Image (tube, helix red, strand yellow):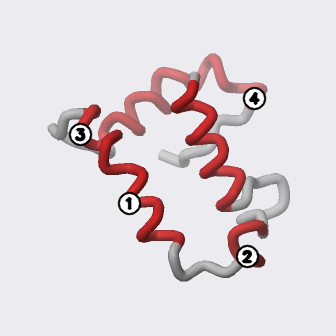
C-alpha cells in the first residue's frame, strides 16, 4: 500500500488507506501510540538540518515540515 491519497481518488481509496494506516500499529492501543508520537517525531528529526526539513520529498510531495504541520493540524481538529 502506498501512503498517498490523491484528492481525485480520495473517496474511492479512503477505506483501503484507513485500513493500511491502522494496520501499522498492529494490536497496540491507538491512544498509547498517539501519546508517544511527539517524542518519536523529536527523535527522528533531531539531526535533520533546515534544508532537509523544508525540501519536498519529490515534486508535488510535502516536505518533512509540512508533514509535521499537518499532523499538528490534525491533532488540533
Looking at the image, is mark 2 or mark 1 earlier in the sequence? 1
Looking at the image, is mark 2 or mark 4 earlier in the sequence? 4
Verify CB contact (< 8 Å) between mark 2 and mark 4. Answer: no
User: Which quarter of the rendered picture does the C terminus lie within?
Assistant: top right
Q: Secondary structure at mark 3?
A: helix
The residue that label 2 is drawn on is 50
Q: Nearer the viewer, mark 1 or mark 4?
A: 1
Q: Which mark is residue 7?
A: 4
Q: Is residue 24 shown above or below 16?
A: below
Residue 70: image quadrant is: top right
The residue that label 1 is drawn on is 40
Which residue appears at 62% of the width and 43% of the height? 4
Between 1 and 70, the one lying in front of the other is 70
Looking at the image, is mark 2 or mark 3 earlier in the sequence? 3
Q: Secondary structure at mark 1?
A: helix
The residue that label 3 is drawn on is 32
Tell me if 50 is positioned left or right of 24 in this view: right
Q: Residue furthest top?
A: 11
Tell me if 75 is positioned left or right of 35 in this view: right
- Across and down, in percent, residue 8 comes to 77, 26
* Residues at marks 3 and 4, CA–CA distance in whole angstroms: 30 Å
> Is disc 3 surrounded by few (<14), some (14 to 19) or many (20+) residues within 10 Å?
few
Amino acid at each position: 500500500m502506498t501512503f498517498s491519497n490523491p484528492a481525485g481518488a480520495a473517496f474511492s481509496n479512503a477505506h483501503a488507506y484507513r485500513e493500511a494506516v491502522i494496520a501499522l500499529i498492529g494490536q497496540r492501543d491507538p491512544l498509547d501510540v498517539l501519546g508517544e508520537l511527539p517524542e518519536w517525531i523529536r527523535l527522528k528529526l533531531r539531526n535533520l538540518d533546515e534544508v532537509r526539513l523544508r525540501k519536498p520529498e519529490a515534486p508535488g510531495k510535502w516536505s518533512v515540515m509540512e508533514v509535521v504541520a499537518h499532523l499538528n493540524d490534525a491533532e488540533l481538529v
